[in-house]
Image: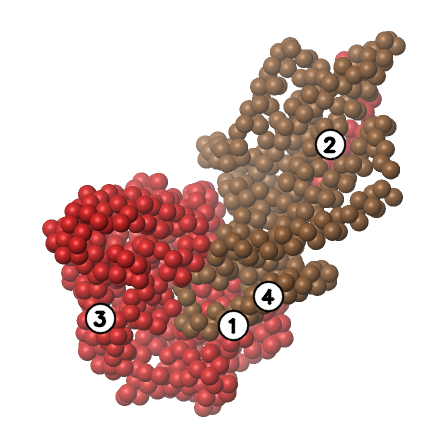
Chain colours: A red, B brown
Amino acid sequence: MSLFQRARRIDSRARFFVTLLLLVGLVLSSGCSQTEPPADLTIINGVEPESLDPAIITGQADGRVVAGLFEGLTRLNEKTARAEPAMAEKWEISPDGRTYTFHLRTNLLWSTGEPITTADIVYSWIRALDPLTASEYAGQLFYVKNGEAFTTGKIKDPSQVGVHALDPYTLRVELEHPTPFFLDLCAFETLTVVPRQTIQKYGDRWLMADPLPCSGPYRLGYWHLNDKIRLLKNTNYWDAANTQSAIVDMLPVGSPDAALNLYIHGQADIVWDKSLVPTDLIDLLLQRPDFHSFSYLGTYFIRFNVTKKPFDDARVRRAMGLTIDRERIVTKITRAGEQPAYSLVPPGTANYSPLDITNYDPGLARKLMEQAGYKDGNGFPTFEYLFDAPAGGSAKIHEDIAVELQQMWHDNLGIQMNMRQLEWKVYLSAQAQLDYQVMRSSWIGDYNDPNTFLGMFTSTDGNNHTGWKSPSYDALIHDANQEPDARKRAEIFREAEKMLIDEDAPIIPLFYYVGINYFDTNRIQGIYQNVLDMHPLQTIKKIKPPR
Amino acid sequence: MYFVKRLMYAVPLLLIISALAFGLVRMAPGSPFDRERVPASPEIERQLKAKYHLDEPVIKQYGRYLNDLLHGDFGVSTKYRNHTVNDIIEQALPVSMLLGGLAFCFAMAIGLPVGFITAARKGQWPDVIGGLLSLLTVCIPSFVIAPLLILDFSVKWNLLPVGLWGTPARMILPTLALGMFFVGKVARLFREGMISAMQSEYVRAARAKGLGETTLLLKHACRLAILPVVSFAGPMLADLLTGSFIVENIFQIPGIGIFFVNSTSNRDYTMEVGLALLYAILLVLLNLLVDFIYTLLDPRVKYE
């Protein structure tokens, strides 16, 4: 009798364990084979949304889901990403640009069947402004009269805020000043319409309500964290006839390799987050016909802390900007078709025409340094350049750029730079507390207007983070935002930007971002590239491949 | 009685762990609401902190936390603001436990026989090959094994899915990637245990009585040799059941392991403390279980 035969006989416990294993297997296979209909469209959407509450979300991935669930007075056109009528079928704007009268469609319904009226819009906006909601994007409603005063508690009565329901289908909105991008803002998620009764009943966990009343082209099937968000067509949506896909699955995937693998193996139809392109393969991938790169409202730039020597001297900051070979950075490091940037506001921004300047002149830079008292870098202290650690498997682009900058500044100006990499939250905290000398930074436009970029460098803006304060710059931005004439307004903004980039230079723009998404154009229809990288879900459709 | 006492001791231990975790996460630089985009008014950030009581003194926050904890409430995640920590654990832990359980079974099912054979054939070729294989699995980390498995089984041979969760086929590769390290570890521990057991006096006595080699190995040596594996299995199971950041990330599995790492980089205070406690509770319980199994396996072990 062999050793193993005996083993079997001696140890009856083994049999018990084998049975147990089989049982576990059985439970597994039965537990997993829940049948659910396959999705008409599967999209890899980027990181897991923090929330699906329009008033709470801040991330782009969150916004892409929420845009399917909740709608505002306007929505963004899938081709141009500009506002088009949605809940409001038409509107009038007063000659001074401060009062908007919106006329709602009369056939608006929640996904659960109840009518949507102007009272719901007033409720949703006031809720986003309410201090108790603690909405980080409440600022999108500060253009509305008394919006900011209500959020900061200066006024307590919500009826003083400039949004009024004249009747169930007519809404009057008063603004603080003329705001040419206000119709675009009406499509922004913070201003979309949310269900009052459900929120009052369930509080912070209202999104778990079943059924959840939705105002957009889709309703929520389910939301399993880090697994899947399933969206189902909202048949009560006013434009439901034009919703192209009935079931849409949004997969949260953080790793570019996993996203690419899933896409190639047919587990996903669309991948639409630039951070989901494996950077090491970018040259190869961009040659494929299903990889699409397009220009985008975002700029990568360097921030100076102007409260610290020697960066309090504009000549030093300008000299450092003049010696950066942006062409080299976009061709050697980023490699996805980014354009070198010499202005903060990217080309293609609405209500604007970009500055036409090229800031590359090492000769002038050396002269400026000499004037500042640092001939050939003599006497210039070694300084520190901060950048953040790449998150979740994305490439070390910030580090590679830092290495290039170190070399360029050393070769052209004779100055020494040390690099310091920080964890994301630590990096943000250093930025907020001005606890840095020079750091990398970036900004993605919230709406299609120069104000989303230029407004942040006014003295009091929370996103300034440079310590740079200029009363004349503040005055220009203020004037631009009071100016009802579009051409004059653009001109004032250009003057302000020239001051920001060319004269005082508390920041140095490096390049404009591109967006990248990947999908097979022979199989997917209804996605159009636009500067906001916004692609309304209801227009996207998968077509069967020809046999 | 002894085990009841041990459970009682666990209470102050968990209190200390929760206090430490609570204080340490708040001492780390950066806060949950440090964002790339600062809200349009500083008032908004103040309201946000007030909403999560982060504006109160830490002691008061901790008191509030303990009180909620007594009611089984781990609090609201500061990152996923519509979810409580309980919601997240409820959704993600079963997935990780299933994967961890499978990896545990896999590690035992392969590791124990390999350990047994290498010990029984000590110095002969099965020992050399088995030893080499277990050394290999212990040395290669999961972030190397997982992509290699995907490359071969999914990309090249198209046999198994590249990722996601929910069907038995999708569970195979993650189970291998997660369990491989423990296969080697279990095999080596069991082999060592067997060899030292074979040299112990009671085995020598049994052999002197004239027992056959096979009975000796299976009935007498095994029982003692399994002890190091059992004591390793406790913390190992706690590790496996709470998921793996690497394996879950590579295979896109909706488990709890991802939260262990991400909650830290997100400074998700409530989630960090909740997970630390969850892990501590599992560890305490499983260690207790290990001690209990000891009393069953080794008659010499008695707890007063």
Q: Are marks 1 and 2 on the same chain?
A: yes
Which residue is label 4 attached to? B57
Inspect the image, locate mark 2, and give the three-letter code of the amino acid beneath it. Answer: Val
Residue A496, numbered label: 3
- Chain at numbered mark 1: B
The front one of A438 and A252 is: A438
Look at 64% across and 15% down and name the residue there.
B127
Indicate the secondary structure of the residue bearing disc 2: helix
Furthest residue in direction bottom, as rendered = A166
Mark 1 vs mark 2, foreground winner is 1
- Whether residues under marks 1 and 3 lie with C-beta atoms below 8 angstroms apart, the answer is no
> What's the residue type where badge 4 is placed?
Pro
Compute the Cα span from label 1 to label 3.
33 Å
Circles 1, 4 touching at the beta carbon (< 8 Å): no
Disc 1 marks which amino acid?
Gln
Instruction: Give the Cα separation between the discs numbered 1 and 2.
Output: 51 Å
Q: Secondary structure at mark 1?
A: helix
Residue linked to disc 2: B230
Q: Count how many numbered circles sit on residues in the image.
A: 4
